[in-house]
Amino acid sequence: MKADEKPNIKELSLTEFAAYLAAAKQPAYRAQQIRQWLFREQAIDFAAMTNLPGELREQLDSTFTIGRLAILRRHDSQDGTVKFLFGLGDGESIESVLIPEKHRLTLCISTQVGCAYGCAFCATALLGFKRNLTCGEIVEQILEAGRTLSDDRRISNIVVMGMGEPLANYAQTLRAIEIMVDASWGLAIAPRKITLSTVGLVPQIQKLMEETNVTLAISLHAASEELRGRLMPINRKYSLDQLIDCCRNLPLPRRKRITFEYVLLGGVNDSVADAAALCRLLRGVPSKVNLIPFNPHPGSEFHRPSDDAVKRFQQVLFDHKLQVNIRRPRGDDIAAACGQLQGHLQRDLLASVAPVAAN
């Protein structure tokens, strides 16, 4: 933020809010009123906050801004999936994906601009890492996507699985989750309807499950140290054994399971032997497995497995009594894999300046 810019009021913690209101000689309950306007009513200007004194509204307007994301691009898929490319105040951009299903409407949100973890099959990894998002930028993805919906539709589920590694941006992600779940002034989304996906930052996983009740998803993608190390560099810091031991010992409530995400890469990790190894690996872990046939993207060496290979893999897991779901790729026609839309934007920008550069 530049020195002459007003801070975004959505970034203030409750403690900071309380201190500001105390200094302004305002009662503490104003904090809840203001937050209700920001997150429940989704106000975009202070004048709309009609239960606040006019003097306070003017003071807020002179001191803060109400941050918003710009929709740079919106792509609608034939299957109902909608992909947003949101512009940030510093010129960077992030992606969110809205996924309609029969009984729910899920939004997949980002926590970083790019990603530093370099998973071999991931489109976001090709963009590199730029910076962490603030809690306001994380939550605003939900608000802006919600503003595009008709009055009879509401985002019911959140998946923190977009661009970036949420546990590498732990403090801001946790503050965003607090806003999502709060029923008095926040978005009132039940913790069980929020899923956070991580590549496997073991200490932060343990901390997350102690401090929240969200659903944990682990990006696994291989059942051996050697293959996971090739696909996911994080495995060199936190080994597969360490990760599974951590999952096995988490204090999970009864009947709660860890979701293991497994992207099936044709000819790489999709064999019957790979499936059997996955079953052995997850023995004793309260788990369910999401099998995700690879969503191809430009610049990747991998390809999607055949339908027969996916069915064979699934059957092995069924035979070992694992709960398993095949998550079919959504939005193939709109480049819905995380990082693809931003990659298209960067290529378009490079193409637009290329003739100038040539001179």
Image: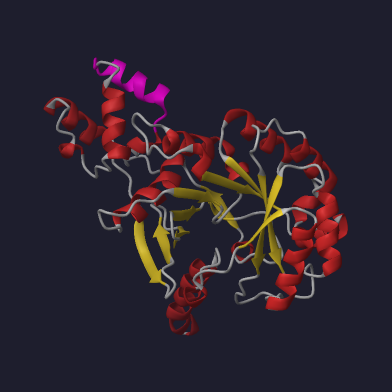
Q: Quick check: is 68 in the magenta stretch? A: no
Q: Is residue 337 visible?
A: yes
Name the side, left or right, on which 256 lies relative to 79: right
86 or 153, which lies in front? Answer: 153
Magenta residues, start to end: 12-26
Name the side, left or right, on which 141 lies relative to 113: left
> Please, is residue 165 above or below residue 135 in the view?
below
Give how far across and how far down residue 217 sits, in percent: 64, 48
Q: Is residue 111 visible?
A: no
At x 28% / y 43%, what residue is drawn?
42
At x 55% / y 65%, what residue is drawn?
339
Residue 207 falls in image quadrant: top right
Number of disc labels: 0
Give how far across and how far down residue 96 sits, in percent: 46, 58
Colour option used? secondary structure
227 or 4, which lies in front? Answer: 227
Residue 317 falls in image quadrant: bottom right
321 or 20, which lies in front? Answer: 321
Task: Kindly report the secondary structure that dominates the magenta region of the rendered protein.
Answer: helix
Q: Quick check: is 19 in the magenta stretch? A: yes
At x 16% / y 32%, what residue is drawn?
58
At x 82% / y 49%, what residue is drawn?
240
> Please, is residue 323 above or below residue 212 in the view?
below
Name the side, left or right, on which 330 lies relative to 314: left
Give how far across and how far down residue 320 sits, in percent: 80, 55
Give how far across and how far down residue 160 sits, in percent: 54, 49
